[in-house]
Image (cartoon, grey):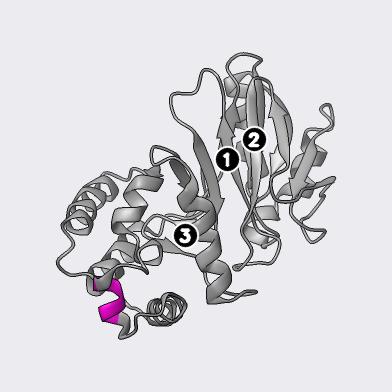
Amino acid sequence: MPALQDNYMYLLIDTVSNEAAVVDPVDPASVVQRVYEENVLLTTVLTTHHHWDHAGGNVELVAKMKGNKLTVVGGDERVDAVSKIISDGDELKLGSLTVRSLHTPCHTTGHICYYVTGPNAKHPIVFTGDTLFIAGCGRFFEGTPEMMNTALNEKLASLPDDTQVFCGHEYTLTNLKFALTVEPQNRDIIKKLQDSTDTRVNSLPTVPSTIGEEKKTNPFMRVTENSVQLYAKTENVIKTMAYIRKQKDSFKA
């Protein structure tokens, strides 16, 4: 569900129980409308982090859904209306679905990604908020290059390659254009940029990606590759992460 200028919210529905959770509901009115249209029981709010464009609708949504007592999940007390603070590896049940929290501090210290599996799911999925974007990552507002490297290249990279990635913003074209400056000969990036440009021309979302695709096209998940280290002029993984983040911060597509 698109929101604001370039945000994405998501309604996660367990088709077995008809129970649902919403991810980062910054536009509560459209969430409520969608819940009624889908005729599902909304029980849970999954908040990736406390920034207003992700958590800013929590209080209003809880008020609008007062007939349902919503559990608002988040990684720290800064999340608006939070009623359940979770840690790395904690699991929640949403009907037949299992939602596992992945603590990925850096963009914020309390950032949580939500990894979802279920017996009837074709693929596992992960909601990555502002940690992992398609072909990019979030700014290091409250963390370090070491922390982002751990989040992306240890925690998220360990998920199955077919895990579908649903991120918090539509930044894909700019991210891929930057990725191409890092690796101008990367055929996977060239093709993904072409495909994503066609997608956006038709006003369609570029999500989801997959973990496997990100390993091929996302420079922040390729910091061990010679081509990326050549761009950063260092063979040190952490210095490479820091350098490409600094370059991306000032990049103009």
Pointers 2 and 1 in contact (C-beta within 8 Å): yes
Residue shown at the point (79%, 61%) measured from the top left: 78
Residue 230 seen by the camera: yes
Residue at the spot of label 3: 153
Judged left or right of residue 221, residue 169 is: right
Q: Position of residue 142 (x, y in %)?
A: 65, 74
Q: Earlier in the sequence, mark 2 or mark 1?
A: 2
Residue at the spot of label 1: 115
Magenta run includes residue 73: no
Residue range corresponding to the magenta coloring: 227-231
Q: Amino acid at mark 3?
A: Asn
Q: Earlier in the sequence, mark 2 or mark 3?
A: 2
Residue shown at the point (40%, 61%) measured from the top left: 221
> What SS does tag 2 mark?
strand
Label 3 neighbour load within 10 Å: few <14, some 14-19, many 20+: some
> What SS does tag 3 mark?
helix
